[in-house]
Amino acid sequence: PWGSPGGLWREQIARMGLDRRIDMAAFCDDVGQRKPARLLFDYTLARLDASPRHALVVGDDPRWDIAGARAAGLAAVLIDREGESDSAERVIGRLDELVALVGG
């Protein structure tokens, strides 16, 4: 009911070396509530003691990930593997493109 388990995503993040470039990754199963609800975004900001302007949300669904991020006042990057959307501030085609975006 909560999408892909966070543990699987954390493994992929580590495999790509992104874990060394981010402060935290949070997933719906961490808070027990699905996006686009604000709880996940607020939880993450609170854990980081950060404001929305210092955070970046990365997701592959404009309706859940990007809309939720925007509703919480966060910048967003959409992973658009098909190259069909421009609904986020930034769009990438593959997760490994994120390295260049975050200064890798």
Image (tube, grey):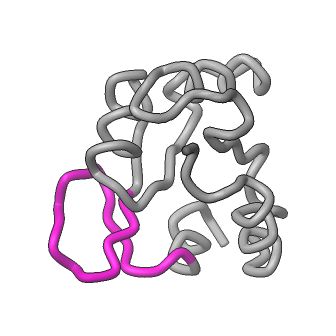
Does residue 68 lie above or below 10 as drawn?
A: above
Which quadrant of the figure contains the N terminus? top right
What residue is drawn where x is 80% and y is 80%?
A: 15
What residue is drawn where x is 65% and y is 44%?
A: 27
Left or right: where 25 falls relative to 92: right
What residue is drawn where x is 59% and y is 61%?
A: 102
Left or right: where 85 falls relative to 46: left
- For the image, the number of numbered tags is 0
Left or right: where 38 falls relative to 26: left
What residue is drawn where x is 39% and y is 23%?
A: 73
Residue 89 is inside the magenta segment: yes
Does residue 104 lie above or below 10 as drawn?
A: below
Does residue 41 lie above or below 2 as drawn?
A: above
- Residue 67 point in image, percent of width and height: 30, 37
Q: Give the extent of the magenta segment.
A: 78-95
Which quadrant of the figure contains the C terminus? bottom right
In-front residue for pair 7/78:
7
- Residue 30 point in image, percent of width and height: 74, 35
In-front residue for pair 50/59:
59
- Residue 34 point in image, percent of width and height: 50, 34
In-front residue for pair 30/51:
30
Residue 42 is inside the magenta segment: no
Does residue 91 lie above or below 49 as drawn?
A: below
Dominant SS type (magenta) = loop
